[in-house]
Image: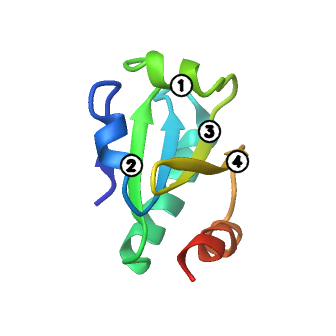
Amino acid sequence: MVKVVTDQDFAAETDTGVVLTDFWATWCGPCRMQSPVIEKLDESMDNVKFTKMDVDANPETPKSFGIQAIPTLIVKKDGKVVEQIVGYHTKDQLTDILNKYTA
C-alpha cells in the first residue's frame, strides 16, 4: 500500500533508502491515471518505498521542490533527490528509472 505523507512527516518518511513520492491532487486527471501505476509498482518492487502527497492539503513540501505541475514524481535516495519526473509515466518507464538507484 502506498503510504500517504504530509508536510509534517515527509522528511522522516523519505530520508532512508530509495523512495518515490507521487505529488498529486484529486482534481488532476493525469494524477488519477498515474496512481494505479504507482500502486502496481508498490506491489512488485520491495526495494523501493512508495509514498504520495496531496499538494492541495500539503503546500509546503511541493513548494520547497519548486513543483508547478502535477503529477510530479520525486525519487530520493538516502534523503537526496536523484530524479524529478513531471507528467504521466508507464510502469516500465518508472521501473527503468528506479532500477538505476536500487542496483
Q: Earlier in the sequence, mark 3 or mark 2?
A: 2
Of 54 and 5, nearer the camera is 5
Placement of 16 over or under 13, stated as above or below: below
Q: Residues within 10 Å of mark 1 (few under 14, many from 20)?
A: many
| Cα–Cα span, label 4 and label 2 | 18 Å
Q: Residues within 10 Å of mark 2 (few under 14, many from 20)?
A: some
Between circles 3 and 4, the one closer to the viewer is: 4
Between circles 2 and 1, the one closer to the viewer is: 2
**Secondary structure state at the residue bearing disc 1:** helix
Quadrant of the rendered structure where residue 78 is?
bottom left
Q: Earlier in the sequence, mark 4 or mark 1?
A: 1
Residue lying at 68% horizontally and 68% vertically, measured from the top left: 97
Task: Tell me the amino acid under the disc marked 2.
Answer: Asp
Task: Tell me the amino acid under the disc marked 3.
Answer: Pro
Residue lying at 64% horizontally and 26% vertically, measured from the top left: 67
Task: Tell me the amino acid under the disc marked 1.
Answer: Pro
Locate the N terminus and report the quarter of the image it occupies.
bottom left
Q: Earlier in the sequence, mark 4 or mark 2?
A: 2
Q: Earlier in the sequence, mark 2 or mark 1?
A: 2
Residue denoted by label 3: 71
Residue denoted by label 2: 15
36 left or right of 4?
right
Between circles 4 and 2, the one closer to the viewer is: 2
Residue denoted by label 4: 85
Between circles 3 and 2, the one closer to the viewer is: 2
| Cα–Cα span, label 3 and label 2 | 21 Å
| Cα–Cα span, label 4 and label 1 | 13 Å
Placement of 24 over or under 57, stated as above or below: below
Residue 49 % position (x, y): 38, 62
**Secondary structure state at the residue bearing disc 3:** loop
Residue denoted by label 1: 62
| Cα–Cα span, label 2 and label 1 | 16 Å
